[in-house]
Image (spheres, rainbow, N blue to C red):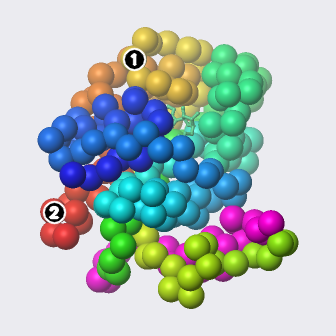
Amino acid sequence: MLNYVTTNAGKVREAEEYLGNESVGQLDFDYTEVQAPELGPIAARGAREAYRHAGEPVLVDDAGLFIEDLDGFPGPYSSYVEGTLGVERVWEIAEALEDRRASFRCVLAYCDGEGFAASPDPVDRGDRVAAAAAGPDADGEVSVEGGSAEPLPVKLFEGAVPGRMVAPRGDGGFGYDPIFEHDGATFAEMDAAEKNAVSHRGRALGKFAEWFAER
Ligand code: IMP
């Protein structure tokens, strides 16, 4: 059983739709979301923490909305911005922009305690970038997570989808789905299968599923 690590039931529904619900279970584990400019190191660190917690294979899903004219904001801060400003206010900010192009990005981070053979998808080895993103510990030291010289390798799978910001439409999905339009429909106007066929998460899940079948 693969543990899909998230507190977000909407993400799990989409993963089940893609991978089949016999092979995926939700691990409702709130890993530490470090603040970092890229999704990859955030997801990789979460995957190590979740693997140490569960002792079983884990897949962490970190996603964000990147608005082009705002230099990618809210990006890795999407969760915080949804919780503070809310989706309606993000639309109000986007409405004032001339260029409303945006993209959703998703990084899936897989860890099962073992190493990985070479493939086009990147491996995060908990190097200094991830250590720096984690910030200093209680003694003010920046160290590799877990204090180990051999941090757990994590495999990363990325997906992105272009679209544009629109006034809220649709009742489905979750998060920013009602204000993100792709090919004439918002993600909230699509069912899970339609969204997966084009979405950032669907694209990352597709790469992961192909690789995982050989694992
Ligand atoms: P996180 O990956 O759980 O940290 O999510 C970051 C933020 O993006 C949260 O506010 C989510 O609600 C939002 N989000 C993540 N994936 C999606 C998606 O597929 N559609 C809409 N919003 C999303």
* First of labels 2, 1 by sequence position: 1
Residue 77 within the magenta-colored segment of the rendering: no
Q: Which residue is label 1 attached to?
A: 172
| Image quadrant where one finds the C terminus | bottom left
Residue 121 in sight here:
no
145 horizontally vs 120: left or right: right
Looking at the image, is 155 positioned above or below residue 164? Answer: below
Question: The magenta stretch spans which residues?
Answer: 117-138
Which residue is found at the position 43% from the left and 52% from the top?
60
Which residue is found at the position 24% from the left and 45% from the top?
24
CB atoms at circles 2 and 1 under 8 Å apart?
no
Q: Which of the 4 image quadrants contains residue 10?
A: top left
Which residue is found at the position 41% from the left and 23% from the top?
173
Q: Which residue is label 2 attached to?
A: 213
Nearest the eye: 60 or 163? 60
Whole-percent x, y for residue 126 in the image: 55, 76
Which residue is found at the position 59% from the left and 27% from the top?
165
Whole-percent x, y for residue 201 in the image: 38, 44
